[in-house]
Image (cartoon, rainbow, N blue to C red):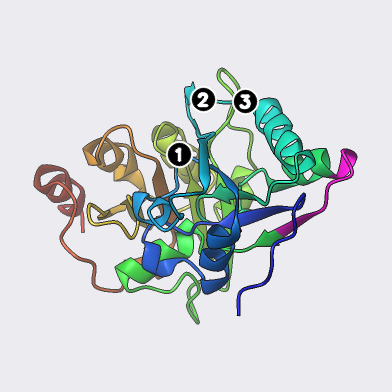
Amino acid sequence: MAEAMVAGEVWLVGAGPGDPDLLTRKAEGLLKQASVVFYDALVGPGVLELIPAQVRRVPVGKRSGRHSKDQGSINDLLVAAARAGERVVRLKGGDPSVFGRSMEEVAALAAAGIATRICPGITAASAAAASAGISLSLRGLARRVQFVTAHVQAGAPLAVDWPALADPGCTTAIYMGRAAAGEISRQLIAAGLDSKTPVLLACDISLPGEQLLRTRLDLLPLAARSMAAGKPMLILVGEAVAGGAIRESAPAAGRAAALRAW
């Protein structure tokens, strides 16, 4: 039985990578009970179709360079809806607690005296690994997994600990990595990671138009340019991503250029 929503309470709900079949049963139950859903641009259309017709839908998507609402405005909308006694769902792509800025919203709601709860979702790195038939960790090759975001404010440097990311015994999942692909390649190689380290690129993860492309670290910028433009891209780096059996879904020209190096 789905957990009952309380009027005036806000649930931060993970929508997963896009495929509605990957939504948790709890998340689906919360969507059916909500009176209003504030949703991100990364939420898959199939997930949105699960929201009942009588539920008010409010798009608050933020994509690089195209923000429909700033974070402060989103916080204000959530507070206003909760204070009005609505059953509020804040629907976020992937998992709310993985680069979802969930704590900013929790803090704003708490300051207004509003209770919040979190329903997790499948994050993009896990979904991409499943589609590619690989494991993010692998005995003897990848003893740990690290997540990092390449999305920064306009004009700001990509300030990360490159030596830490260049650990050859780790799988690194880089979210929103398209624009920084060249810098990621250069910096990781400069920090000591082998230029032939396997890389997997993923766009539209779990959706019908999903693209998965294998390449290697020194060819990452070329491979990134071959992926569909304008879509968020996940980059997986490490020896563990070399296995598996992916579907042939990337554009043929880009796939051939990136794979010739193997």
Mark 3 lies on residue: 70
Residue type (three-letter) at the residue carrying disc 1: Ala
**Residue 64, magenta (yes or no):** no
Report the magenta residues as a range: 110-117
Quarter holding the C terminus is bottom left
The first of marks 3 and 1 along the sequence is: 1
- Distance between the alpha carbons at the discs numbered 3 and 1: 13 Å
The first of marks 2 and 1 along the sequence is: 1
241 over 223 or under it: above or below: below
Look at the image and tell me whether residue 145 can be seen: yes
- Distance between the alpha carbons at the discs numbered 2 and 1: 9 Å
Secondary element under disc 2, as helix, strand or loop, is: loop
Which numbered tag is attached to residue 41?
Answer: 1
Q: Position of residue 70 (x, y in %)?
A: 62, 25
| Residue furthest front in the image | 54
Residue type (three-letter) at the residue carrying disc 3: Asp
- Distance between the alpha carbons at the discs numbered 2 and 3: 7 Å
Crowd rating for badge 2 (residues with CA inside 10 Å; few <14, some 14–19, many 20+): some
237 over 161 or under it: above or below: below
Q: Nearer the viewer, residue 83 or 116?
A: 83
Quarter holding the N terminus is bottom right
Q: Position of residue 30 (x, y in %)?
A: 59, 62
Look at the image and tell me whether residue 97 can be seen: no
Crowd rating for badge 1 (residues with CA inside 10 Å; few <14, some 14–19, many 20+): some
Mark 2 lies on residue: 68
| Proximity of marks 2 and 1: CB atoms separated by less than 8 Å | yes
**Residue 116, magenta (yes or no):** yes
Which numbered tag is attached to residue 179?
Answer: none
